[in-house]
Amino acid sequence: IMVGDELRVKLGEGGQYLYGKAWEGVGYVKDLVDGEVELELRTTGNIPDTITDDYVVEYIWKSTSYDRMQNALKTFAIDDTSVTGFIYHKLLGHAVE
């Protein structure tokens, strides 16, 4: 993970038992220091700050970079003017003189 990634934090079963109910929050990674993750939660309300373990952390995947890559490959395949002929043939591994 890296700064800016989105994470979901939930109480595990033992934590839910201690807290008395289920809880989950979503936030962004603010900082990483020596293996510790600083998370800025968007959730307001009662955060179970007295419970120090039995949390489940899920990474929330964002498709932005994947979508951009797919769009670029589609443009490369369809649009003849997206790159020069020289670059096109070099990228495809063709012999270019």
Image (cartoon, rainbow, N blue to C red):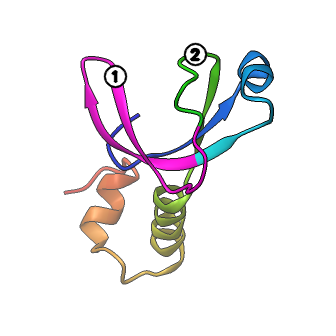
Q: Splitting the image into 4 quarters, where does residue 58 fall?
A: top right
Instruction: Check disc 2 and report the residue beneath it.
Output: 53
Bounds of the magenta segment: 26-47
Mark 2 element type: loop
Which residue corresponds to the image point at 67% horizontal and 42% vertical from the top-left? 24
Vertical position of residue 12 compared to residue 90: above or below: above
Image coordinates of residue 16 in percent, x first then y, are 77, 26
Image coordinates of residue 27 in percent, x first then y, are 49, 49
Q: Which kind of residue does numbered mark 2 sit on?
A: Asp
**Residue 36 numbered mark, or none:** 1
Image coordinates of residue 6 in percent, x first then y, are 49, 48
User: In front here: 29 or 70?
Assistant: 29
Q: Which kind of residue does numbered mark 1 sit on?
A: Glu
In the rendered structure, the answer to whether residue 68 lies left or right of residue 95 reads right
Query: Crowding at label 2, few (<14), some or many (≥20) Cα neighbours within 10 Å?
Result: few
Q: Which SS does the magenta portion mostly show?
A: strand
Mark 1 element type: strand
In magenta segment, residue 87: no
Which residue corresponds to the image point at 67% horizontal and 34% vertical from the top-left? 10
**Residue 80 numbered mark, or none:** none
In the rendered structure, the answer to whether residue 16 lies left or right of residue 31 reads right
Q: Please report whichever mark, 1 or 2, sits nearer to the chain's N-terminal start.
A: 1
Which residue corresponds to the image point at 69% horizontal and 29% vertical from the top-left? 11
User: In front here: 95 or 19?
Assistant: 19
Vertical position of residue 15 compared to residue 78: above or below: above
User: In front here: 65 or 13?
Assistant: 13
Outermost residue, left side: 97
In the rendered structure, the answer to whether residue 45 lies left or right of residue 36 reads right
